[in-house]
Every structure is written in C-alpha cells, then in structure tokens.
Image (spheres, helix red, strand yellow):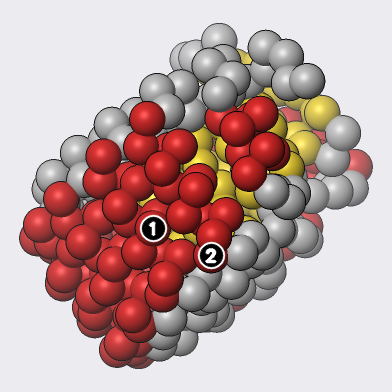
Amino acid sequence: MVRNIERVIIYLRNDTDIEMILKNKSIMYLHLDNNISINLMKYLSEVLKKNTSIKHLYLNYIFTDGKMKYLSDAIKENKNITNLHLNCDINLESMKYLSEIIKHNTTILNLYLDNINAESMKYLSDAIKDNQILSCICLDNDINIDSMKYLSNAIKINKTIKELWLNSDINIDSIKYFTEILKNNIIKGLWFNHDINIDSMKYLSCVIKDNKTITSLYLKYNINVESMKYFSEAIKYNTTINKIYLDNDIDINSMILLSEAIKENSSIIYLSLMHYINDESMKILNDAVKYKNNNNKFIFKKLYNNIYFSKI
C-alpha cells in the first residue's frame, strides 16, 4: 500500500501499479524507471489527465511514437505538471508530438530532454519560439552547429526562458552562434556541463565580460590555466554575475587568476568550488575572501570536497 509520500521511483508492471501509485493524492514527483509497454502508457495517460497532485514527471527509456502520442494527450489536459524530464531517445515523429505540447502548454516551466538530433531540434526550436511560459531548458546531448543555429534563433525570439543547461560537447562553430544569443537576451542562469576548450572560452568570455543579465554561471569539467585567464578577465569586469559554480580541478596557477578576479569583482556573493583543493590553493582563495571582507561580510566554508564562500 502506498502511503502519504511525495516522491515515487517505480518500475511499472501492470494496471494495478498505476492505480496504486497515481490515486495517491500526495505524490508530487513521479519517476518511471523502466521501458513500459504501449498499453501501460495508454492507461497511464488516462490517469495523468485526471491527476491533480503530480508536478514533476520523469520518464526513462525508449519512447516510441505511439507512447509519445499518449503522453502528449495526457499533458494537454493536465494542468499541474510543471517539470517534464524525458531521459530517453526521442525520434523525429515523437518530437513532433512533443513539440505540440511545448508550443501550447501553459504549465510546464522546466523541460529536460536527452538525445535530440538536428532534425528533431528544428521542431523543438519552432515550439520554443511560440511558448510563453518555459523558464528553464536542459539539453543532455551533443549539439552540432545546425542544432545550435535552431536553438539560438528560438531563444532570441522566446521571452520567458531564464535558465539554459547544456550538458554536451559544444564545438567552436556552435559556440559562436550561442554567444550571439547572450548579447541581447534575458537569460539569467547559464550552465555548461562539459569541457570548454580555449577557443570556445575566448568567445564565451567576451560575452560574459559585457553581459548584463546573467546572474548565475556553472562550469563543469576541465578548465585549464589558459582558459582560466580568459574566464577570470571576464569576471573582473562583469557587474551582474553574483553566483559562480566551478565543478572541475583547479590548479594553483588557475586559482591565482580566479582569486585576483574575485578581489576586483564587486558583484560576486557566492562561489562554489566542487573539487579537491590543496592547502596552498586554499590559502590563496582565503586571502581573496579576506580582501573582500574589508567591505563586505562573507562566510567561508568547506563541505566535503565542496568549498564555498557566500555573503552573510
């Protein structure tokens, strides 16, 4: 028997499982972690149409065209789901159904998608242009230049998207298109969850330096000392970014560059470093924080391997 719980991760096997889970009115997070049959998806769709508690829907594994059609029908009628996470391959026909959801939906705020090719990205981008409520998009796949063109054009037109997560390799040609959309846009949170080479960092840093909308910036994986030079120079002059998350190894030379940028920057109030830092690098960072403390009150803490300072 399912009791009053807010989050459920389940392998659906039959109709009884669906009834048991979805009739519970306290479930807000539903994570389906197996490749359910089209018949189960049909039944799940009917239940979702009537459900009023689920706000976060996570679906893993392969979605065929038929399954996506049933999901689309459900979300069209459901007015409560605000987070849709599809961790699965989405082919072109499935993307056509999904695009119709995105184009007309008035409740989904956060959209997370895996494995989208350029042709599917075109349909997604056309939908984003018309959508008037999405605030966050996370794309967990490699984005080639054609896909980036479609995405960039869509975000230029869209007026609601505030956060963009790119968990993928982005080559130098793609980053050129991407940086163009940051020059005149309302994006406030930017998350790169993959390597950024030095040429890409040059372009990105030039935009960050003068950008007036981004307030949170997250960079993961390797940033070498050459890339850190460009990044730190941009941070020195940016006046709107107040939160920085660096999830990568930082050697002592990179730490020196970052610390000097922190000293000169007047807007950063939160810095999180998520990898191990040796004692020498820690001292350099600590000195930078002490420097900022001349005019501001900051706390400086270490939590496991996560080192951060934030304004009190």
Of 179 and 1, the residue lying toward us? 1
Circle 1 is placed at which residue position? 70
Q: Would you call the spot at circle 2 few (<14 residues within 10 Å), some (14-19), or many (20 or more)?
A: some
Q: Quadrant of residue 65?
A: bottom left
Relative to 89, is 304 on the left or the right? Answer: right
SS at mark 1? Answer: helix
User: Where is residue 215 shown, x and y percent of the image?
Assistant: 36, 38
Identified by mark 1, the residue type is Tyr
User: Where is residue 126 shown, x and y percent of the image?
Assistant: 16, 70
Q: Are marks 2 and 1 in contact (CB under 8 Å)?
A: yes
Relative to 66, is 18 on the left or the right? Answer: right
Circle 2 is placed at which residue position? 38
Q: What residue is drawn where x is 68% and y is 38%?
A: 16
Q: Which mark is residue 231?
A: none
Q: What residue is drawn where x is 46% and y is 65%?
A: 67
User: Where is residue 53 shown, x and y percent of the image?
Assistant: 46, 22
Q: What residue is drawn where x is 37% and y is 30%?
A: 50
Identified by mark 2, the residue type is Ile
113 to 246, vertically: above or below:
below
